[in-house]
Amino acid sequence: MPLEPHLTDRPMTNGYAKAESREQYHPSGARSGASPLKEAVETLWKGRWMLVAACAVTVGAVAVYVFTVAPEYEATSLLSVELNGDPVQQRLQLGLDQDFGMGNRSLDNELWALSQSVAITEYVADELLRLQTVPETGKPITILEDKDGNPLSREQVANRLPSRLRLDQAARGVSAIRVVGVSAIPEEAALIANLYSEAYIERAQASSRARIFASRTFLEEQEQKLQADLALMEDQIRDFMSAEGAAALDQEAAQTVNQIAELQAMRDDARIQLDMKKAALTSLEQELSEIEPKLVQRVASGVEEELDRVLTSVANLELQVQQIHQQNPDLRNRAASDRNELVQIELAQLNDRIKNLRVRASELSKQYVDEVLSIGGFDPGEGGGAGFSFVAQKRRQMAETRIEISGLEAKLVTVAQRLADYDQKLREIPGQAIQLAQLRRAQQSAERLYVLITEKLQEIRIAEKAEIGYAEIIRPATTPSKPVRPQKARNLFLALVFGLMVGGGLVYGRRHLDSRLHQPQNLKDLGYSVMGVVPDMRKFVKETFKGATTSQVQGREINTMLPVIFEPLSSYAEAYRRLRTNIQFSRPDVIVQTILVTSGEAGEGKTTTALNLAFAMAQANRRTVIIDADLRRPALHSMLSLKREPGLTDLLFHNEPFRPERYETSFENLYVIPGGAAVPNPSEVLGSKRMREFVEKLQAEFDVVIFDTPPVLAFSDGMLLSTQCDATIIVAAADQTDIRSFRESVEILEGVGAHVIGCVLNKFDPRAPGVVGYPYGGGYYYERYYEYQGT
């Protein structure tokens, strides 16, 4: 394809330069040298109505939503949670008097437990059903009814509550939970948040006091029972001594009774602690069974058996130490004698063995706890990391409690064996003394046990009263004044932004998907020479002729699409004069005399372009003839109100000599040869020998010969005639001609050897949406043209 006339150093093929970049062009591509920002602004401005429509739709839809949806309020209650705990190894000791505490807790655990707790949800549901209305306003509680106003059951209300609640950490690094109630009624939102908070506080207190309460109840029962036993024993001893006249026990019998009483006190103490531990274990198992029954199962492990053996050995050694202290009460108070030194050495050896066994017990305990935590029954993915941590914490406490139970059971076995030995000694005492010794033994054992239980009961009562739980409400929820959803201003702004994004996407999407020609730069980017750009004349016809299709000139009805006749000083007429000039200089080595005007498809304005070009040539004092070679749909005669016959076909099929004056018009230097009579084979007519001879006659008679032919993609007529012309011009319509179709038209003409000198972009509107970065911007062809004419 040829380039612009001044760029003649490019290689030529059939008089038409071929650009290397044709296949790489896309109509949305940026114009060479144009500012990307300017092109983007122009693209959006051209598609402004699409932007407006997209914004109107999105903003309108969001506006309907935000102004019709029920508002949603949030009320927040703030809870403080105390997190503490002791390391495992520090609590894995025998003979612990205190119960296990809550153990290590984390805020994630508490959040998970609070969100998963069925008891809390059911408590809140019960309270809401009891209230029925919001206390502050007396309005019905909406969560208790479905959308049709029907009341819901307790279970249905409990199932709906999680959707009206949000739980999260109040702030990073702070041990506080934020309980957020959500409702369409502000007072109801505050009520839900406060009820959840109160239920959580009660749960925390109950969890802290559960095992303390079990221990206190057991000790109170034992205290009452021992009081009655002591009173009965005192009566029995008094009655026995009165009846038998018995005296006090001798020293050996008294010592045996004291040792038996001491061992029985140790046994009873161990039993009390064992019962307390078992109660604590039962509490833990019940707590875990609510989550998953499998979690309470014990692990079958050889570690537990070895641990039991170690704990039994420790219990035996501790009893030996205790007996040594009983037999040597002055061991710590007097200066060491030789015997005392031996006893101290024995005590030191026993304590070392106990210490080593305790270390081993600690190692085995840790191993046992790890094995317990590794058994199945809980999937971490089901409750998340926090849920697994919570369950692991409870299972660790269960394992530790079982270890203590094993230690206490081993101690009981050892004490029972020692008691059997001392019972044998007691039987060797004389008859009357035996009964008194047994009574004294039972009394002393009961007294020591009573003192022990009384002390423990007092400690537990103090601990229970001091236990207020590990969580407290530091800020109750108050009635919110403004809804949190919908945020009207924010939502409308976001809708506007979204609408702009959607509209912009549609504008650029349409531009990228559109394969039509829109502006001269599109043709240049394809490598085609633009011989002329003809503005869209619909505005011209509307303003000049009020939309009429014809107007009278010299007594004839002439088509109004001929501005060269009606408005010779207009920008429209100037566009055809520019085309005339470019054609004259398109082939420096050849005088362009015969010109073929065609298009790829129908309706692109080839006939209007050919006729206006003919008028422009005639006005330049060049003897011009235009021939209607579109024998299928001839239109020249109707545009000028001429007769169709005689015409081209009559000249070719009759032997009459060609007389130009018969085809002269009232316009100076312009001759028009219509199509003539219809023929069945237009292609054969135009490709015939007579047609070639007729073209030679025309070249001899006229300065310029212009042919108007059918579209090349529809018919081959133009291809046959183009080989006989000096130049071929292809007309394309802006916003109408497809790039692929135009390229195919050029390739067809070049394929038969036509001299395609360039193209004409018809119906061009610089303000059309597809036109971006056009240098004239409509100014040169419109305003600037008239400004210059007026100077």
Image (cartoon, rainbow, N blue to C red):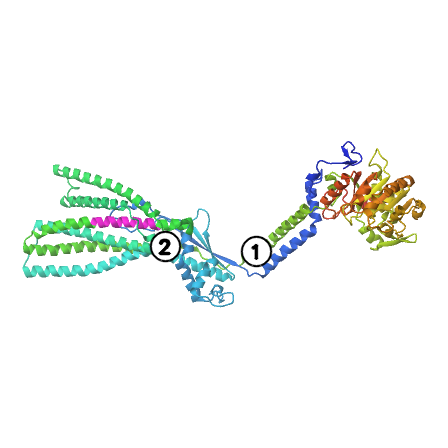
- Between circles 2 and 1, the one closer to the viewer is 2
Residue indicated by mark 1: 487
Label 2 to label 1: alpha-carbon separation: 42 Å
Principal SS element in the magenta part?
Answer: helix
Instruction: Specify the farthest residue to the top.
Output: 9
Mark yes or no: residue 532 visible. no
Residue at screen point 17% across, 60% down: 229
The quarter of the picture where the C terminus appears is: top right
Mark yes or no: residue 113 visible. yes
Give coordinates of residue 138: x percent, y percent: 48, 67
Magenta segment, which residues?
Answer: 394-411
Does residue 560 belong to the magenta stretch? Answer: no
Other residues around mark 1 within 10 Å, as few (<14) / some (14–19) / many (≥20)? some
Kindly identify the amino acid type of the residue bearing the numbered disc 2.
Glu
Residue indicated by mark 2: 292
Give coordinates of residue 726: x percent, y percent: 84, 38
Residue at screen point 88% across, 41% down: 693
Give coordinates of residue 653: x percent, y percent: 88, 47
Residue toward you, 295 or 244: 295
Kindly identify the amino acid type of the residue bearing the numbered disc 1.
Gln
As helix, strand or loop, the secondary structure at mark 2 comes to loop
In the displayed structure, does residue 500 sit left or right of residue 698? left
